[in-house]
Image (spheres, coloured by chain):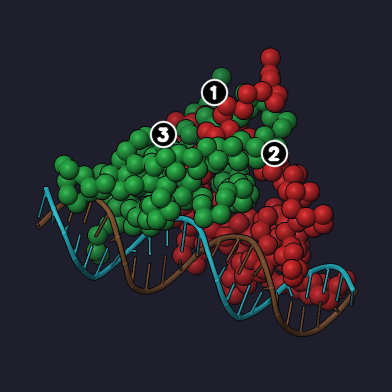
Chain colours: A green, B red, C brown, D cyan
Amino acid sequence: MEEPMAAHSQYEELARQLSAIGAVKREMGRMLPQECPPASAGVLTLLDRHGEMRMSQLAELLAIDMSVTSRHVAHVAERGWIERKPDPADKRSRLLRLTPSGRQLLDELAERYTQTLARYLHDWTDTDVGHLVELLARLRTSFGDCRIRAHHDSPAATRTPAAG
Amino acid sequence: MEEPMAAHSQYEELARQLSAIGAVKREMGRMLPQECPPASAGVLTLLDRHGEMRMSQLAELLAIDMSVTSRHVAHVAERGWIERKPDPADKRSRLLRLTPSGRQLLDELAERYTQTLARYLHDWTDTDVGHLVELLARLRTSFGDCRIRAHHDSPAATRTPAAG
DNA sequence: TATTGTTATACTCTATAACTATA
DNA sequence: TATAGTTATAGAGTATAACAATA
């Protein structure tokens, strides 16, 4: 028997846990190689999963403003991990794509992530990890779906609201 | 049938989800009142739950360096949300305690958190929320337990390593 | 006129190191 | 000598606003 819209007694506790999970994120970040901050790893991972894309799409996937995305992309491009090609369909756009060097770095990242988590989560079952992954993904979806309509009337969400 | 130490195929996915959960944290942070950034809310919440404590204890609970804790504490103290009393048992220490004003702000925070989460998680059951809270708490524990031994030999973890 | 992407500026959060005052 | 706490400095991350180039 599930109870949607019930007491909500655990909302404050969830807020607290979300606030405190930053410590775990920071610890994961310390495992990254030099020159590759967490934000860069995020860019590379998304380009690997979703393939070639434009800045605006990447900003949407990262759920951060495009101005911030632009900086992160410049960082990884300067190090040769991605390439930026002009978009033949729209000369304002640039198409982002992983380079072989970037893919090699991703292999390194995957190994470090796996080693780190294997050490910290040695007493977790695959089922536990799967549940957590599933619930985190669902949490992001629940927030994301609302975010579109919540802030402004514009459907493009991760854009600077353009002058006030 | 659970399988501890199995394939670990979902470790990369967990790393990705942890990286992306920042968007949810930021959205929660936007619901906070002026003058009260997320870090201040964390300080107040912990003092409410654990009662009067010293700086070092708070830093340990926040899982951040005491120098950072000092800044956050100064911020909330300047606004009258906590008071810092000298510790009669150790003149170097200061005892932190919520003020009535701070408790009043906490009531406001709880209401905002609850309203925000009730809106975003309207289709979640209490069981779902409980699972997520439980798994996040366990994740922090798994990382925290390792962190003590991982960095240095000293058992006091959240302290600047004192000169190199 | 609107949109894509970049850059400048400011703010939050964190870590390191140097410092003080006690212990 | 070691510890509790503060402050100065540096670095990562993000948001807002102004801008250039193109649609």
Amino acid type, residue under disc 2 in the picture: Tyr
Mark linked to residue A120: 2
Counting the numbered discs, the total is: 3
Q: Give the Cα separation between the discs numbered 2 and 3.
A: 25 Å
Tell me whether circle 1 and circle 2 mark residues in contact (CB < 8 Å): no
* Location of residue C18 in the rendering, given as x and y in whole percent from the top left corner: 70, 80
* Location of residue C12 in the rendering, given as x and y in whole percent from the top left corner: 51, 64
Looking at the image, which is closer to me, B110 or B54?
B54
Q: Nearer the viewer, mark 2 or mark 3?
A: 3
Mark linked to residue A2: 1
User: Along the polypeptide, which appears first: circle 2 or circle 3?
Assistant: 3
User: Along the polypeptide, which appears first: circle 3 or circle 1?
Assistant: 1
Q: Nearer the viewer, mark 1 or mark 2?
A: 2
* Location of residue B144 in the rendering, given as x and y in whole percent from the top left corner: 72, 46
Mark linked to residue A87: none
- Which residue reaches farthest top? B1
Tell me whether circle 3 and circle 1 mark residues in contact (CB < 8 Å): no
The residue that label 3 is drawn on is: A49
Q: Residue at x 71, y 54 (%)?
A: B61
**Chain ID at mark 1:** A
Q: Residue at x 70, y 24 (%)?
A: B4
Q: Is residue B89 above or below residue A71?
A: below
Structural crowding at the residue carrying mark 3, measured as other residues with C-alpha within 10 Å and reported as few (<14), some (14–19) or many (≥20): few
